[in-house]
Image (cartoon, grey):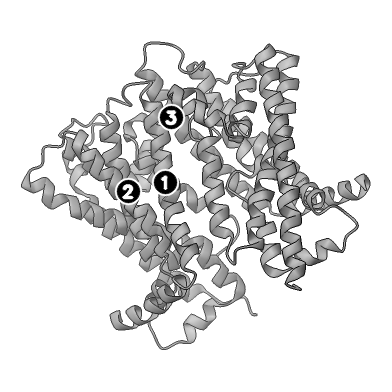
Amino acid sequence: MLTTLLAVARQALNRQLVYRAANLAGLVTNAFFGFLRASVLIALFAAKTAPRVGGLDLRAAVTYTGVAQALIVWVALWGWWDLIDAIKTGDIASDLQRPLSVFWYWCAQDAGRAVAQLVMRSLPIMAVYAVLFPLALPRDVVQWIGFGTAIVMAWLLCFAWRFLYSLAGFWLTDATSIGRAAAFLMTFLSGFLMPVGFFPPWAQTLMLLTPFPSFINTPIEIFVNVATGPHMLALLAIQAFWIVVLITLAHVVLYAGLRRLTMEGG
Amino acid sequence: MISHYLKLVSGVLRSQLAYRTAFIVDVITVGMSNALEFVAFALAFAGFGHIGGWSLWQVAFSWGLSEAAFGTMDMIFSGFDPARFAQHIKRGTFDQFLLRPVGLVTQIFASDFALRRLGRVAQGLAIFALANAGAGVIWTPAKLAYLPLVFVGAVAFYGALFVFGATLCFWSTEGLEIVNLFTYGGTTMASYPMHIYTDVVRRLFTFVVPTALMIYYPALFFFDLPDPTGLPKIAQYLAPLVGFGVLTLALVSWRVGVYKYQGTGS
């Protein structure tokens, strides 16, 4: 089964690699928005006498915007409509005929998509950033390993979340609006718009009660060495916890949805 | 022309209101997602104090103005939205417009009216209204008379960017995302005091794509602030003129594109 899933992932990867012009344009746009965010933070830090805000100095804050822009396509932060469309058109029925788990079949596809985006978008964005700004890099091998683990878990977690809200399609005729709502929740609470550390304490507490900071804020805090040692391990454990919760939830809702689907004879 | 437009648009609106719940969720989502971006900025702002010498309320003033103008444009010009218009070219449905005995520009205007953008307009106006309490603008008759002109000018200007984007589709539908840099990137940029950006970028967005003339320079006039970029004072009064000038230019280029258009042959 694992080899089949790998083949599915490889297909998805190749499919992504075809859209070169779109990827180049997307890269320029991502980098430009990153430049805007960095400019805003540089101007904010200029107004400040204390060198650190929320654990970040200017260099780490600018790096934060860069890694955040690079992670957009890796976790598909703007949302994902493939599963919603498959449920809407009824194509989901053909997934049921495959001798594979529905969840892991879509997950393998998304893995291929993510790897393609990593190569074509995320790494080039970091390269552009490295040219424009002095960056804060993981200080040693341990941080690099922590960061690598964190982005893989961030992707899986975000996939489980996207899968979960897409299942609304079983109950609603137009789940696209739910998808849009879910996507904006994610951008706000994940620390994508502003680092979680910049928010007042009460807001931080609220954000940290949700799985969303694990999508963006966690990998970046590890990257810029704000989270190290036991703190880093704790953040990774929180990511793992949410993965278990969201994947379990996704399966429960999926089976409820499928039962409804067969009842309608669709 | 107007009566054709109204008749066509009323059909579009009726179809959008057919799925009432989805529509309401969409309006709220669109409004909230833009508002939350400001909320994130405002919450983080408390830890800093000012940005380029501007207070939070001064940022809110230009933010609200830019967002409300862009949202209004996004409704009226949604037929020209490059992402949507490209579909007409790809699928060959643009040819249908050419066959109908109604003016082409009227038809494209009437082909869509994204009413869900009302959410964006509403949040822009709300932020703008809030800003007025705190931004300390001393309203004079001249300023009150100029404000609606700035708004209409900005709508025309942002609309021109959509028309330019749609025109590009006649040459290529690949890599159109680059237009986002000037539309969505431009409106984001204009939300902040534009002297925080590096000279090259600010000049590009003043003299080549005159986004700065629409919101930033007029804002200096409303705030009675000296111009840190050293342009002549007239730059603050050009918004309506430049807005409609650029729109005229865009419609001329659109006409050239239509003459050049040969269809996909499908």
- Which quarter of the picture shows residue B164? bottom left
Residue B71, image x, y percentages: 36, 55
Residue sitting nearer the eye, A214 or B162: A214
Dots 3, 2 in contact, CB < 8 A: no
Q: Is residue A62 above or below residue A182?
A: above
The amino acid beneath tag 3 is Ser
Which residue carries the number 2 mark?
Answer: B124
Give the CA separation, mark 3 to mark 1. Answer: 20 Å
Residue sitting nearer the eye, A41 or B181: A41
- Which quarter of the picture shows residue B243? bottom left
Residue A198, image x, y percentages: 46, 24
Which residue carries the number 1 mark?
Answer: B34
Of circles 3 and 1, which is in front?
1
Which residue carries the number 3 mark?
Answer: A39
Instruction: Check disc 1 and report its element: helix, strand or loop.
Output: helix
The amino acid beneath tag 2 is Gly
